[in-house]
């Protein structure tokens, strides 16, 4: 459906007004995690393991406690015992128990009257370690004789006799894979590897925590989800969740990495031990890289069968992914489910291994698992297209998932937009540009499930006829603007008459974080329900005044109106008039809606990238980049484009530069931005975008989440482009210049 | 350790603070003067979120000691909107949706203003290299570069 036609019925949706929080954010007024302070506040510093794996024999804090200004020291001994499952993992990660499991694992923490005293005191805490053997690489961790990260980590899915670091095995699929491969004209199989990367949000984790002896506390924190922070912190500390009130600050990026806790309970534990004085805890960049939640690293075997005309007959994938030292964090299940989600293949077999390694506890990172899977599958598809002399977009169109296709991971797709993204990419001028020497073009598609989840919103009429919306998902990239637009559209009032507030845990029912590309989708769907309650109430108030039945009143353009001539002749009663008199006509008017939301609507995108590779240095330059993605409906197109561009930039970084580099000693060697090299402005060209709109039938305005899919295609698209430019196929990211140079040399010599 | 008395001018106001000789200018701005617009993203001069100018020179305030501000003139994001009127860069950043989370925005605005003061008509490449020391993880820089171009054009017109 053309975009103009979609927009025809809307006054505000699809427009690009200024975001309501823009002024605060360009003047430095907006308060982020570390910007918050309260009276009588202490400062925290954390002592971290310098070893990848070590027994903690003794912690002596006496010298630290003797330092003037030091008010409290906490270790694991200050946390309750008896936890199990993920609560225990969270507690183990907050402060190490008997064993430090990775370089940077928190061991103790101190609170003092200044940040400098806290840092000095942390250096005075003496920890005695017995260093244990460690394992870092995912394939090394799969060996039978690998150092054991955690005893007894395997669950019921792991067969007897498996390698000791395998925590979970997956096996699923459909169709007769062997028969499918036999039917193919070309069967290719290769192994692909990706390294761990970090979300790289520019704002380090920060919070101010206060907890009294009575178990009542408060926290101000940068987080994607304050109810998650509340539940997890309460569990780790053994307090009641309801007694902890958590207020989210503005958030300086998250990308999945701020959906969980790292050191937040430490601030609360220190506060409790320091007589309830609030404690501020701000991580350094090195702490963020060493001890928060990077992605998994992956080792993946993929096999595909294809006929000469490009028809795929069968596929199989065996993925091994480490998610750090704790079970449950490897996104291998998601990766497998995403691997072939773009394709309609009659027979598929998925096999996966969650593996433990002496690395930090992985967290979500934008479409967790999907970028790695896409790198493996979309690289192999590209290799096969080249082997058979087929156009990569035509092959994807031939096999692409459509409405009614049974997804590789189970359900049947409703309306989806993969084919539309492929067609738009093929028609885009970027796909026609003639390339020069040392230049190459890469194409790849990508997928993310999208998520609805637990959602609670409320709306309230002001006496002046404006509307206040309360949401519980932090605004990480323009959410207030999209919620404001949907609210104003629903009421038929100006965008400026809506105020959207992100409220604390005491002001709404439970909300999941801003994750899963859900915030605009879920808040929008819930607020329409909540707004309709108030619209119904306003119609009732008008009916009462007019002396007609409520059913005879309808709502349009911000006013109650008689529904047709039979209802009677009355001038429209505006929201302002109703609100001004609501005290007398029956009281305040407000609405709310709470639901665990389904219907998120699967998300697909296709990227086209042109690169030039310097044959002398192996350095890859991005010449032009195109993102085409289905938004369902773009509520605020500028912020939709922003998600596409930002996802592409992160994916380009993952493809070209970013990786966790460990030394032989198991310590992270690049815990600063100088060495953990995220893309800078001079690394990138403008990033072209096309917003495809195939409305999501599960949303009143057709919204699909747009946050995550954009990071998925860049990994293979860039690798495919480099292969096209150099003739050298590299199956191990990142494509750093030395690696590209070596591959070019091998390709020439080979 | 005894603290050192520093007198400096911040956003046009004469200001005094006491600082530990180990404290950075960023720490002093944020914790002594409550000017929290400059952010610490790295503490190692790699991300530019703490960008301010000192006597007109763009610096990472995390790499400057607080004591070095003695007798200097410091400009931060808080001083950018003169008399309550937004600088064209600030306005164009909002209008171009050039921020998502907004944490890098103060530093990028300070750096871009410094660029336009010396080069009122920068090319896209010049903008990209000037801002290469200011990391943004959300936007992919596209809308940031466009907003700077738009502000530059607007400022040339009104100059």
Image: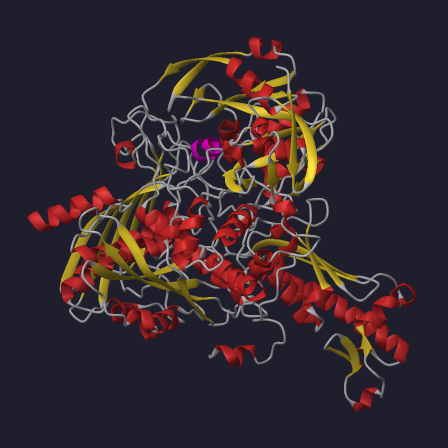
Q: What's the magenta region? A: A284-290
> Residue at the bottom extreme?
A565
Report the residue at 56% width, 58% height from top: B93
Q: Position of residue A556 (x, y in %)?
A: 72, 78
Please state which of residues B87 and A253 is positioned toward the viewer in this rendering. B87
> Residue at the right extreme?
A584
Left or right of residue A342: residue A220: right
Q: Is residue A182 magenta?
A: no
Q: Position of residue B102 (x, y in %)?
A: 56, 50
Q: Position of residue A472 (x, y in %)?
A: 64, 51
Left or right of residue B6: residue A399: left
Please state which of residues A15 and A667 is positioned toward the viewer in this rendering. A15
| Coloration mode | secondary structure
Residue A30 in sight in this render: no
Residue B147 in sight in this render: yes
- The answer to whether A266 is drawn above or below residue B147 in the figure is above
Magenta-drawn stretch, dominant element (helix, strand or loop): helix
- The answer to whether A397 is drawn above or below residue A501 in the figure is below
Picture quadrant of residue A169: top left
């Amino acid at each position: 459906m053309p975009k103009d036609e979609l927009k025809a019925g809307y006054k505000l949706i699809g427009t690009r007004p200024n975001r309501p929080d823009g002024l605060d954010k360009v003047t430095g007024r907006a308060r982020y995690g570390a910007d918050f302070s309260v009276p009588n506040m202490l400062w925290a510093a954390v002592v971290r393991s310098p070893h990848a794996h070590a027994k903690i024999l003794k912690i002596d804090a006496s010298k630290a406690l003797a330092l003037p200004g030091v008010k409290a020291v906490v270790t694991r001994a200050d946390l309750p015992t008896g936890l199990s499952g993920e609560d225990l993992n969270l507690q183990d990660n907050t402060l190490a128990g008997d064993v430090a499991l990775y370089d940077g694992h928190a061991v103790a923490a101190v609170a003092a009257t200044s940040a400098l005293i806290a840092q000095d005191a942390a250096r005075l805490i003496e920890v005695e370690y017995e260093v244990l053997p460690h394992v870092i690489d995912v394939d090394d961790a799969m060996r039978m004789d690998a150092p054991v990260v955690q005893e007894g980590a395997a669950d019921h899915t792991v067969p007897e006799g498996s390698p000791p670091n395998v925590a979970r095995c997956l096996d699923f699929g459909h169709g007769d894979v062997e028969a499918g491969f036999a039917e193919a004209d070309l069967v290719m199989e290769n192994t692909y590897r990706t390294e761990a990367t970090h979300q790289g949000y520019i704002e380090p984790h920060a919070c101010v925590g206060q907890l009294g002896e009575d178990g009542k506390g408060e926290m101000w924190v940068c987080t994607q989800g304050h109810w998650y922070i509340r539940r997890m912190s309460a569990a780790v500390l053994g307090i009641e969740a309801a007694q902890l009130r958590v207020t989210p600050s503005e958030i300086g990026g998250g990308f999945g990495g701020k959906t969980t806790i790292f050191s937040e309970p430490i601030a609360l534990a220190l506060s409790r031990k320091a007589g309830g004085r609030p404690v501020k805890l701000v991580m350094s960049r090195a702490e963020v890289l060493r001890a928060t939640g990077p992605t998994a690293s992956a080792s993946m075997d993929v096999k595909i069968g294809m006929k000469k005309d490009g028809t795929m007959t069968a596929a199989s994938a065996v993925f091994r992914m480490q998610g750090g030292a704790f079970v449950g964090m490897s996104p291998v299940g998601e990766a497998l489910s995403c691997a072939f989600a773009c394709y309609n293949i009659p027979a598929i077999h998925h096999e996966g291994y969650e593996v433990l390694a002496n690395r930090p506890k992985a967290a979500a990172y934008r479409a967790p698992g999907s970028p790695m899977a896409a790198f493996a599958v979309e690289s192999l598809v590209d290799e096969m297209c080249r082997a058979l002399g087929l156009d990569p977009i035509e092959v994807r169109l031939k096999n692409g998932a459509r409405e009614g296709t049974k997804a590789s991971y189970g359900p049947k797709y409703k309306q989806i937009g993969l084919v539309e993204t492929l067609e738009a990419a093929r028609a885009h001028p970027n796909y026609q540009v003639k390339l020069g020497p040392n230049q190459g073009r890469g194409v790849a598609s990508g997928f993310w499930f999208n998520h609805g989840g637990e959602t609670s919103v409320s709306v309230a009429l002001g006496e002046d006829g404006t509307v206040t919306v309360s949401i519980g998902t932090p605004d990480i990239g323009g959410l207030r603007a999209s919620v404001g637009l949907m609210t104003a559209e629903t009421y038929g009032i100006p965008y400026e008459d809506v105020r959207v507030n992100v409220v604390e845990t005491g002001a709404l029912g439970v909300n999941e974080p801003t994750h899963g590309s859900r915030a605009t989708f879920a808040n929008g769907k819930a607020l329409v329900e909540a707004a309709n309650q108030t619209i119904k109430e306003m119609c009732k108030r008008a009916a009462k005044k007019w002396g007609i039945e409520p059913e005879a009143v309808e709502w349009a353009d911000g006013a109650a109106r008689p529904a047709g001539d039979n209802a009677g002749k009355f001038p429209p009663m505006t929201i302002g008039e109703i609100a001004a008199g609501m005290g007398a006509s029956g009281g305040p008017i407000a609405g709310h809606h709470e639901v665990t939301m389904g219907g998120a609507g699967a998300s697909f995108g296709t990227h086209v990238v042109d690169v030039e590779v310097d044959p002398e240095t192996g350095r890859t330059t991005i010449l032009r980049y195109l993102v085409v993605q289905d938004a369902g409906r773009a509520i605020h197109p500028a912020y939709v484009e922003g998600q596409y561009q930002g996802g592409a930039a992160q994916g380009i970084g993952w493809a070209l530069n970013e990786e966790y580099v460990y030394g032989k000693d198991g310590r992270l060697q690049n815990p600063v931005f100088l060495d953990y090299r995220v893309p800078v402005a001079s690394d990138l060209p403008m990033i072209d975008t096309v917003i495809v709109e195939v409305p999501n039938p599960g949303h009143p305005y057709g919204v699909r989440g747009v946050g995550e899919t954009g990071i998925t295609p860049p990994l293979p698209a860039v690798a495919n482009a480099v292969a096209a430019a150099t003739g050298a196929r590299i199956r191990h990211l990142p494509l750093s210049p030395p690696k590209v140079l070596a591959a070019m040399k091998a390709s020439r010599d080979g | 350790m005894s603290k050192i008395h520093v007198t400096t001018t911040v956003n046009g106001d004469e200001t005094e603070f006491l600082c530990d000789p180990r404290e950075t200018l960023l720490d002093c701005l944020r914790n002594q003067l409550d000017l929290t617009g400059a952010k610490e993203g790295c503490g190692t001069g790699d991300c530019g979120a703490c960008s301010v100018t000192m006597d007109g020179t763009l610096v990472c305030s995390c790499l400057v000691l607080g004591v070095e501000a003695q007798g200097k003139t410091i400009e931060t994001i808080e001083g950018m909107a003169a008399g309550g009127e937004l600088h064209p860069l600030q306005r164009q950043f909002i209008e171009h949706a050039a921020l998502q989370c907004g944490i890098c925005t103060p530093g990028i605005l300070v750096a871009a203003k410094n660029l336009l003061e010396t080069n009122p008509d920068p090319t896209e490449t010049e903008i990209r290299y000037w801002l290469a020391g200011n990391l943004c993880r959300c936007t992919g820089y596209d809308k940031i570069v466009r907003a700077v171009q738009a502000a530059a054009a607007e400022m040339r017109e009104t100059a």
